[in-house]
Amino acid sequence: MRKLLVIGIGAGNPDHMTVQAVDGLNRADVLFIPDKGARKSDLAELRRHICDRFVTNPNSRRVEFDVPVRAEPAPSYRSTVDDWHEAIAAIYESLIRDELSQDGCGAFLIWGDPSLYDSALRILERVRMRGNVEFELEVIPGITAVQALAASHKIALNRIGDAVQITTGRRLTEEGLPDNAGSTVVMLDGKCAFNTLDDNDLLIHWGAYLGTPDEILISGRLGDVGDEIVRTRDEARRKKGWIMDTYLLRKPGEPEE
């Protein structure tokens, strides 16, 4: 039976690769490299660089594929994502069927960790449910942007006895900060949702391109650095054509662990 490895490759720094991830790359006959277009060519290039650096299996080969662009949410966010995932599932199915032998092993290289705000596992489950191709699945964890953010800012994610919540920019806009979390990590925020919060005394630790030579870090009181983060983010995105960033919010004055 075909074997699929879903490998977390870290938040952007090739040094984030674990020994288990490197071993997985070298077990695979085929390495699947997604291409999200010219504006995000750096993302595909980093995957190529990781393969160049770590793959020693002379029999492995790379197969690059185009990722369809997700439409703007209409009529709803969930239905738009569902349509997008269905389109990607069709691509995954054809890759598995056409590029892997019946006993072959393929690997998908996933930014960060496959379990945190990445849909590869859900999409592969769609492929499985279609019943057209059979495969075994193995997941190899990777360093997340959340870990990289805390490491770069030299902070602990949690405070003594407090919970940590991980959410999205969209939900932060809709619901605000949760009452029961001492620290809130916000991911997938393309619109600087922290600007919708009324509390300027919140502490924010923000980072973009974490772990890479282009890493940008800003931290401080939200009322003091919020506008700076917006400007810096806009400038960085114009310069590179894309941006990956995340941030942590917490109220001041509470004890650190």
Image (cartoon, grey):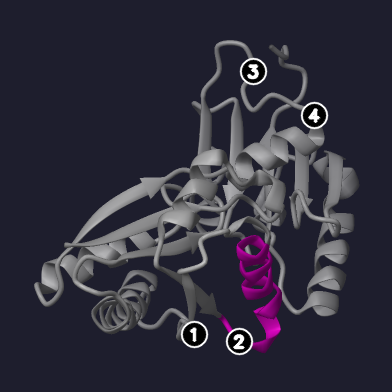
3D distance between C-alphas at marks 1 and 2: 9 Å
Mark earlier in primary sequence (4, 1):
1
The spot of residue 168 in percent (x, y) is 53, 53
Can residue 147 be seen in the rendering of this structure?
Answer: yes
- What amino acid is labelled 4 in the image? Lys
Q: Position of residue 249 (x, y in %)?
A: 68, 38
Give the number of the disc on residue 69: 1
| Disc 2 residue type (three-letter) | Gly
- Of badges 1 and 3, nearer the viewer stands 1
Q: Residues within 10 Å of mark 2 (few under 14, many from 20)?
A: some
Residue topped by disc 3:
159
Label 1–label 2 contact, CB within 8 A: yes
Residue 202 visible in the current orientation = no
Q: Which residue: 52% across, 66% down? A: 58
Circle 1: is it few (<14), some (14-19), or many (20+) Cα within 10 Å? few
Compute the Cα span from label 3 to label 2.
Answer: 41 Å
Element under disc 1: loop
* SS assignment at label 4: loop
Q: Are marks 3 and 4 in contact (CB under 8 Å)?
A: no
Which numbered tag is attached to residue 154? 4
Query: Which dot marks residue 37?
Result: 2
Q: Which quarter of the picture shows residue 143? A: top right
Mark closest to the chain's N terminus, 3 or 4: 4
Can residue 43 be found in the magenta stretch?
Answer: yes
> Nearer the viewer's eye, disc 4 or disc 2?
2
Kindly indicate whether the residue at mark 2 contacts the one at mark 3 (C-beta within 8 angstroms).
Answer: no
Q: Residue at x 63, y 70 (%)?
A: 48
Hey, what amino acid is under mark 1? Val
Q: Amino acid at mark 3?
A: Arg
**Is the residue 3 above or below the residue 167 in the image?**
below
* Mark 4 neighbour class, 10 Å CA radius: few under 14, some 14 to 19, many 20 or more: few
- Magenta stretch contains residue 183: no
